[in-house]
Image: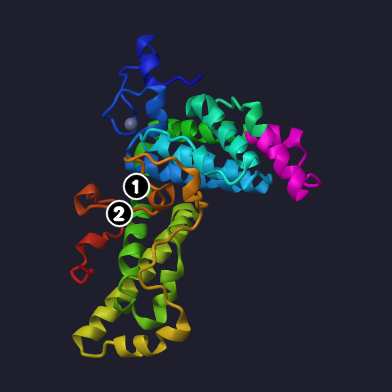
Amino acid sequence: MWAVNMRQFKWKQAESPQCPLCKDKDETRKHLFSCQNITAKSNRKIQISKLSKELRRIQTAPLITNHLIRALHQFHNNYPVSMANTGTANDDTEKTHLESINAQLRLGIDNLLSGALTTHLSSIQHHHIKTYNVGKFTSLRSWNRSVITALLNHANDLWQFRSTALHDEALLTREALLREQAIALLLLYKATPYKIAYEQRRLLDRTATYLRQTHLRNVRSWLSRFNLAIEEEANRAKNGRTDIRHWLKNNGNEGVTVSLPIVDHVEIVPESSISHVEQVPDPSIDIVEPVPEPNSIPRSGLLTFDPLTLSHAPN
Ligand SMILES: [Zn+2]
């Protein structure tokens, strides 16, 4: 279906079988969906969040949304896709539904991304529409059509991203890095908000999702304001005018989140419905991008701002 480089190379259409993003692995179809290049990962998060939103918009049963998104996270991150644990079902209906989820998952995520949807999944949705009377918004037939379209769009968006990157690689890499740096900075300072000038602390209200999805000029503007806010507070601290006491006093009614992880767009799958697989991370945790290791952010002269060079960055 897709002209990945591995295939193109075999057919003498590409110079190399390599992935154009990471330049590390041969670009197979599987690799297209699980490349660990930082821009590819960042883009997949955006696309998964988009897909999740779309599934909700078309009134998908939460059980379906949760398991599909969870399975996609595992698939895209090179983890084995785990089955739903039917042993913990509360009743026969739930058990049947979990078995239906597994029937779909056993077909493989690759098939899912090709729009191969089983009738098992439709039957869960049918039950959902009947039970919660959402039929007036979405009929089963239009849901079937919409969900297949959403999955195909997801796969196609990933393919488009890779193809764009192939032709405009420098731009995309720079943009993605800038976003990742902004996110790293946000997460870093969420734990130490008093290092941001008091008047500017609303900058910490932004989420990682916002910084990934908003227009690039907003990211640049956020970064430069954030940079100024850090500098201002560092200067005050140097002059003995730090306002940490002011912050502590006001923290109660200001509602500053100090160190809570940001989970903003992944629905939590009830733990009881996931079978235990040792090496699979909780998908709700996975979405919180860990602060990158300092050496995983390549230095680039093109970036306007590099938080790693800040002498007063928190430890
Ligand atoms: Zn790759």
Mark 1 residue element: helix
Identify the disc placed on residue 303. Answer: 2
Residue 78: x and y in percent read 36, 34
User: Is 79 situated above or below 13?
Assistant: below
Q: How many circles with numbers are drawn on the protein?
A: 2
Is residue 205 shown left or right of residue 181? right
Query: On residue 264, which mark appears?
Result: none
Q: Determine the residue positioned at 32% across, 41% down.
A: 278
Q: Are marks 2 and 1 in contact (CB under 8 Å)?
A: yes
Q: In this picture, which residue range is highlighted in magenta?
A: 123-147
Q: Is residue 47 visible?
A: no
The quarter of the picture showing ligand 1: top left
Ligand 1 neighbours mark 1 (CB distance < 8 Å):
no
Mark 2 near ligand 1 (CB under 8 Å)? Answer: no
* Nearer-the-camera pick, 179 or 96: 96
Left of 170 or right of it: where is 57? right
**Distance of mark 2 from mark 1, alpha carbons?**
7 Å
Residue at image location 23% in from the left, 84% down from the top: 237
Q: Which residue is mark 1?
A: 174
Q: Main secondary structure of the magenta part?
A: helix
Left or right: where does residue 4 sit relative to residue 107?
left
Please tell me how crowded label 1 is: few (under 14), some (14-19), or many (20+) other residues with Cα within 10 Å: some
For residue 164, which quarter of the picture? top left
Q: Is residue 246 visible?
A: yes
Q: Position of residue 133 (x, y in %)?
A: 78, 49
The earlier-in-sequence mark between 2 and 1 is 1
Residue situated furthest right in the rendering: 136
Quarter containing the C terminus = bottom left
Q: Position of residue 295 (x, y in %)?
A: 19, 50
Q: Amino acid at mark 2?
A: Leu
Q: Classify 264 as above or below 92.
A: below
| Disc 2 residue crowd, few under 14, some 14–19, many 20+, Cα 10 Å | few
